[in-house]
Amino acid sequence: MKNDFFNANSIKFIDYKDVDSLKKFLNPNGRILPRKRTGLSAKNQRMLAEAVKRSRFMGLIPFIAN
Protein backbone atom coordinates (compact mmCIF):
# COMPACT_ATOMS: atom_id res chain seq x y z
CA MET A 1 0.00 0.00 0.00
CA LYS A 2 1.25 3.47 -0.88
CA ASN A 3 1.71 6.14 1.75
CA ASP A 4 -0.59 9.12 1.74
CA PHE A 5 1.62 12.18 1.11
CA PHE A 6 -0.52 14.54 3.18
CA ASN A 7 -0.93 12.16 6.14
CA ALA A 8 2.80 11.39 6.14
CA ASN A 9 3.64 15.11 6.32
CA SER A 10 0.77 15.78 8.78
CA ILE A 11 -0.93 18.27 6.45
CA LYS A 12 -4.54 18.71 7.53
CA PHE A 13 -5.61 21.29 4.94
CA ILE A 14 -4.51 21.34 1.30
CA ASP A 15 -3.90 24.97 0.38
CA TYR A 16 -4.80 26.02 -3.17
CA LYS A 17 -2.04 28.68 -3.07
CA ASP A 18 0.70 26.06 -2.58
CA VAL A 19 1.24 25.53 -6.31
CA ASP A 20 4.47 23.51 -6.00
CA SER A 21 2.86 20.73 -3.95
CA LEU A 22 -0.25 20.69 -6.16
CA LYS A 23 1.79 20.29 -9.36
CA LYS A 24 3.18 16.98 -8.05
CA PHE A 25 -0.30 15.52 -8.43
CA LEU A 26 -0.84 16.69 -12.02
CA ASN A 27 0.30 14.89 -15.15
CA PRO A 28 2.29 16.76 -17.85
CA ASN A 29 -0.95 17.75 -19.59
CA GLY A 30 -2.30 19.36 -16.44
CA ARG A 31 -4.83 16.69 -15.48
CA ILE A 32 -5.30 15.53 -11.90
CA LEU A 33 -3.79 12.07 -11.37
CA PRO A 34 -6.15 9.32 -10.13
CA ARG A 35 -6.04 7.92 -6.61
CA LYS A 36 -4.37 4.75 -7.83
CA ARG A 37 -1.36 6.80 -9.00
CA THR A 38 -1.25 9.34 -6.16
CA GLY A 39 -1.78 6.89 -3.30
CA LEU A 40 -3.97 9.37 -1.42
CA SER A 41 -6.90 8.52 0.78
CA ALA A 42 -10.36 9.24 -0.64
CA LYS A 43 -10.80 12.27 1.62
CA ASN A 44 -7.43 13.77 0.69
CA GLN A 45 -8.00 13.06 -3.01
CA ARG A 46 -11.25 15.04 -2.86
CA MET A 47 -9.52 17.90 -1.03
CA LEU A 48 -6.71 17.81 -3.63
CA ALA A 49 -9.19 18.01 -6.51
CA GLU A 50 -10.97 20.95 -4.86
CA ALA A 51 -7.66 22.75 -4.24
CA VAL A 52 -6.52 22.24 -7.85
CA LYS A 53 -9.83 23.51 -9.19
CA ARG A 54 -9.67 26.60 -6.97
CA SER A 55 -6.07 27.21 -8.00
CA ARG A 56 -7.02 26.96 -11.67
CA PHE A 57 -9.90 29.39 -11.21
CA MET A 58 -7.61 31.89 -9.49
CA GLY A 59 -5.12 31.59 -12.34
CA LEU A 60 -2.28 30.01 -10.36
CA ILE A 61 -2.30 26.75 -12.36
CA PRO A 62 -3.21 26.55 -16.07
CA PHE A 63 -6.22 24.45 -17.06
CA ILE A 64 -4.17 22.70 -19.76
CA ALA A 65 -0.48 22.51 -20.57
CA ASN A 66 0.81 23.31 -24.03
Image (cartoon, rainbow, N blue to C red):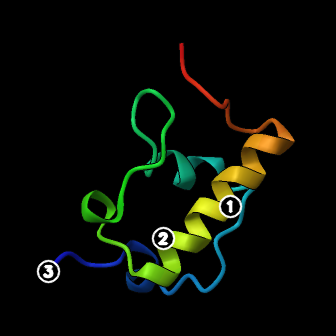
Q: Amino acid at mark 2?
A: Gln
Dividing the picture into quadrants, the one containing residue 17 is bottom right
Identify the disc placed on residue 51.
Answer: 1
The residue tagged 3 is 1
Residue at x-position 39% and y-position 81%: 41
| Among numbered discs 1 and 3, the one appearing first in the sequence | 3
Image coordinates for residue 12, horizontal then vertical, percent: 61, 86
Image coordinates for residue 6, horizontal then vertical, percent: 46, 77
Q: Residues within 10 Å of mark 3 (few under 14, many from 20)?
A: few
| Among numbered discs 3 and 2, the one appearing first in the sequence | 3
Q: Amino acid at mark 3?
A: Met
* Nearest to the observer: residue 7 or residue 47: 47
Residue at x-position 44% and y-position 51%: 25
Q: Is residue 64 above or below residue 12?
A: above
Dividing the picture into quadrants, the one containing residue 5 is bottom left
Image coordinates for residue 15, horizontal then vertical, percent: 71, 66
Q: Is residue 34 left or right of residue 20?
A: left
Q: Amino acid at mark 1?
A: Ala
Q: Is residue 66 left or right of residue 55?
A: left
Image coordinates for residue 61, horizontal then vertical, percent: 68, 37
Task: Estimate the spatial distance between the alpha carbons at disc 1 and disc 3, rounded to whole Å.
Answer: 24 Å
Identify the disc placed on residue 32.
Answer: none
Q: Is residue 12 above or below residue 16?
A: below
Task: Estimate the spatial distance between the alpha carbons at disc 3 and disc 2, rounded to whole Å.
Answer: 16 Å
| Among numbered discs 1 and 2, the one appearing first in the sequence | 2
Q: Residues within 10 Å of mark 2 (few under 14, many from 20)?
A: many
The residue tagged 2 is 45
